[in-house]
Image (spheres, helix red, strand yellow):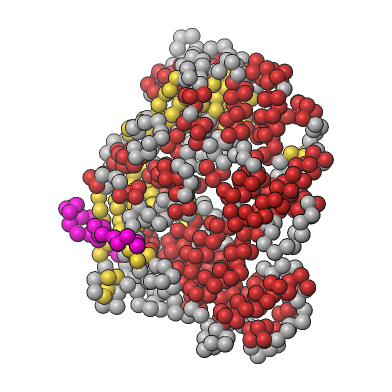
């Protein structure tokens, strides 16, 4: 009998083997390491569950064993990071022991916090029927608090409500002050800290006035309730005889405090996680929670789950070798249950375009060999790293699904910036004009339409806008309008040789003179969006003029909208997955391509500035490696563009360079190159060239010492 909706893959309702007493024969269902965890007694238990080691199965069987041994379901607390994970574990446990486990308290920290607060909120000055604010409601309330705090919400560069709400929530989740959160997440707002703190205090007061809590409050208020009200704390410590926590490495400081307060003197606390997969510090996850657990609980018993059911032996050897370079960790060695497989491949491309060309061609080859597209993933450190791959897959009609956000050219900030390139290239482009105009303060759809009505009847709308008064600019937008006029005049080359700038320079100028400050005021992830735009500018360097650049962008959007497959079917039922490594955690594919493995892209340079940043980046690399089941391709361009030169050497990622060379094989990409593509031994692109390079042929090198373009020296400037 199979559960519905999952094809029998997730919930298989078969009765496991039982002994004569009717109990589950755990030794027949679990490997020795899992069995040891399941049968362990009370006290603090730290379970380091390696990638693909059956963590969920282990937690589920431990739940079942506790109930079978007579622990009352209502005295068990199960904390997870999604309600779906909790439901899945409880469903499986109920199936195993053929018993009702609905009395187990299971769910997310916010869910459990809400259950506690509903009973005791009056102790904190809230009614039991308090309102829960979602992110949109919270952002709207913060926007109102900006005005109440005496700050002009239209003031230039002051962040919008959604940006401040994100900073306030980050401060609460990481147990820091608002000022510290601003300096950490948005240092460009350092000169506005006093005003932001005033808004934060007003927001706190307003929530009490309207009897509302946001998501962060549900954690901080639960901790306050347990810490400051002894009667409440004792009640829950006595109620919960056993506490189990899943994905413990992802807990933040407040969540860890709640766990410690509930566990109390009994300390029957089982936390399950993997320090090697702690990768969410940007969301507030606190690595110290798991790494210092034995210090907080000196009588901790440490268990390791090291049998990997996902990956082949060569992939695990590579992953083990990589993570061994981290100093702060619980040492473990993943061992496969599957056996041998092909060595991971290190694939250098001449540049990012050849990297994309290789990935697309290899996917087609794998698909021809019978690998479904849905079993293939392309992973990367940041969303903008996928731009060239998206374009190449689109050109070849290979369907793909973006897990890390929208398709690159469909993102709002990309469309905003390219709107300037569009109307400078084609001054009659009404939609581009209006999109750009609406970025100015106090200019909405109606006012943008009035401005366009003035411009559209002019022979040269750009020159008219720059040299004459439009007459319909609102008072509050006039300062920004002057910046806008100067910018578009420079983009169009007015006053110089009347020649518009190349598209790469246009994009860089729009970002520096106008859009960066706009992003800082309007987007909580402004630095990430800025990286997207800089990558777009680098990509545009291969185009001499805006027309060719915009034609390719339009083609990408048109082909992508058609949803075509390589085989010509109109409705693809499978597609390649493109994802950041952060979004890929917990998932797996037969074949994984990990791209942009240069030291400027993976590790991410901004992350290296943080204490412990390099080790977290290496953990992220480890997570990427362990997503692959059968084949792993490590790809990197040897040359990358910058604003000064068409091609500079790119350092191979330190995470690859430190791995023993006998753990992977080098592949060489051989091309039928022409003199236009190869000059003096340095592969360069002719100025203005934007067509794809010839298709690649993969050659495996039998001799690891044979020259393959990987062994090169760098000057310090690189």
One can see residue 397 in this view: no
Residue 251 quadrant: top right
The residue located at (47%, 57%) in the rendering is: 400
Q: Residue at x 61, y 69 (%)?
A: 514
The percent coordinates of residue 112 (x first, y second) are 66, 30
Q: Is 611 positioned to the left or the right of 160 in the image?
A: left
Mostly what secondary structure, the magenta segment?
loop
Q: Residue at x 35, y 33 (%)?
A: 334
The magenta stretch spans residue 566: no
Give the residue furthest to the top.
21
Q: Image quarter for residue 113?
A: top right
Query: Which stretch is magenta?
Result: 696-718
User: Is 18 above or below relative to 564?
Assistant: above
Nearer to us in this view, 296 or 673: 296
- 55 or 713, which is in the foreground? 713
Please provide percent x and percent y for residue 71. Answer: 58, 14
Task: Kindly identify the residue that appears in the image at 30 percent across and 58 percent down.
Answer: 348
Quadrant of the image containing the C terminus: bottom left
Residue 548, percent from left and from top: 47, 78
């Amino acid at each position: 009998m199979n559960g519905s909706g999952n094809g029998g893959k997730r919930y298989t309702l078969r009765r496991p083997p039982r002994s004569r007493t009717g109990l589950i024969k755990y030794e027949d269902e679990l490997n020795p390491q899992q069995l040891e965890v399941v049968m362990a007694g009370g006290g603090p238990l730290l379970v380091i569950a390696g990638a693909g080691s059956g963590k969920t199965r282990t937690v589920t069987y431990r739940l079942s064993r506790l109930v079978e041994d007579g622990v009352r379901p209502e005295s068990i607390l199960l904390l997870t990071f999604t309600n779906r994970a909790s439901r899945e574990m409880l469903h499986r446990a109920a199936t195993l022991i053929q018993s009702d486990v609905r009395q187990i308290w299971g769910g997310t920290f916010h869910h459990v916090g809400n259950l506690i607060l509903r009973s005791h909120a009056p102790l904190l000055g809230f009614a039991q029927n308090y309102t829960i604010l979602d992110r949109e409601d919270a952002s709207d309330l913060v926007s109102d608090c900006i005005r109440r705090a005496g700050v002009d919400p239209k003031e230039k560069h002051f962040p919008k409500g959604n940006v401040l709400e994100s900073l306030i929530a980050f401060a609460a989740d990481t147990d820091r002050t608002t000022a510290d959160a601003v300096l950490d997440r948005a240092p460009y707002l350092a000169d506005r800290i006093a005003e932001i703190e005033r808004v934060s205090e007003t927001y706190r007061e307003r929530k009490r006035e309207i009897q509302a809590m946001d998501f962060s409050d549900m954690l901080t208020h639960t901790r306050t309730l347990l810490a400051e009200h002894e009667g409440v704390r004792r009640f829950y410590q006595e109620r919960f005889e056993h506490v189990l926590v899943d994905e413990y490495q992802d807990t933040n400081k407040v969540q860890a405090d709640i766990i410690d307060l509930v566990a109390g003197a009994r300390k029957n606390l089982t936390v399950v996680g993997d320090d090697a997969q702690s990768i969410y510090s940007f969301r507030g996850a606190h690595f110290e929670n798991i790494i210092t657990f034995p210090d907080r609980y000196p009588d901790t018993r440490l268990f390791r789950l090291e049998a990997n059911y996902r990956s082949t032996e060569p992939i695990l050897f590579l992953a083990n070798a990589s993570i061994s370079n981290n100093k702060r960790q619980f040492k473990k060695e993943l061992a496969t249950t599957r056996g041998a497989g092909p060595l991971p491949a290190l694939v250098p491309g001449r540049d990012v375009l050849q990297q994309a060309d290789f990935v697309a061609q290899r996917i087609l080859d794998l698909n021809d060999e019978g690998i479904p597209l849905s079993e293939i993933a392309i992973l990367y450190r940041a969303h903008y790293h996928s731009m060239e791959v998206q374009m190449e897959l689109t050109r070849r009609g290979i369907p793909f699904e973006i897990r890390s956000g929208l398709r690159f050219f469909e993102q709002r900030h990309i469309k905003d910036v390219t709107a300037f390139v569009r109307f400078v290239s084609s001054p009659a482009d009404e939609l581009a004009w209006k999109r750009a105009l609406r970025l100015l303060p106090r200019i909405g759809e109606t006012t943008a339409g009035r401005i366009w009505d003035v411009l559209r009847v002019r022979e040269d709308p750009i020159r008219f806008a720059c040299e004459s008064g439009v007459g319909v600019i609102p008072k509050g937008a006039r300062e920004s309008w002057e910046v806008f006029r100067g910018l578009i005049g420079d983009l169009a080359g007015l006053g110089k040789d009347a020649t518009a700038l190349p598209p790469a320079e246009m994009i860089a100028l729009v970002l520096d003179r106008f859009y960066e400050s706009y992003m800082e005021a309007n987007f909580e992830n402004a630095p990430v969006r800025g990286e997207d735009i800089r990558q777009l500018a680098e990509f545009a360097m291969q185009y001499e003029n805006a027309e060719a650049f915009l034609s390719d962008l339009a083609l990408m959007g048109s082909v992508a909208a058609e949803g075509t497959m390589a085989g010509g079917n109109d409705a693809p039922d499978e597609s390649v997955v493109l994802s950041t490594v952060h979004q890929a955690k917990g998932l797996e594919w037969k074949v994984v391509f990990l791209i942009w493995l240069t030291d400027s892209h993976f590790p991410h340079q901004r992350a290296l500035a943080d204490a412990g940043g390099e080790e977290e980046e290496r953990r992220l690399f480890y997570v990427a490696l362990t997503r692959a089941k059968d084949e792993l391709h490590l790809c990197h361009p040897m040359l990358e563009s910058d604003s000064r030169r068409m091609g500079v050497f790119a350092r191979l990622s330190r995470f690859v360079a430190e791995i023993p060379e006998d753990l992977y094989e080098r592949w060489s990409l051989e091309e039928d190159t022409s003199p236009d593509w190869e000059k003096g031994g340095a592969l360069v692109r002719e100025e203005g060239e934007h067509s794809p390079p010839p298709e690649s042929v993969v050659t495996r090198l039998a001799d690891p010492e044979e020259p393959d373009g990987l062994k090169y020296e760098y000057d310090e400037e690189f």
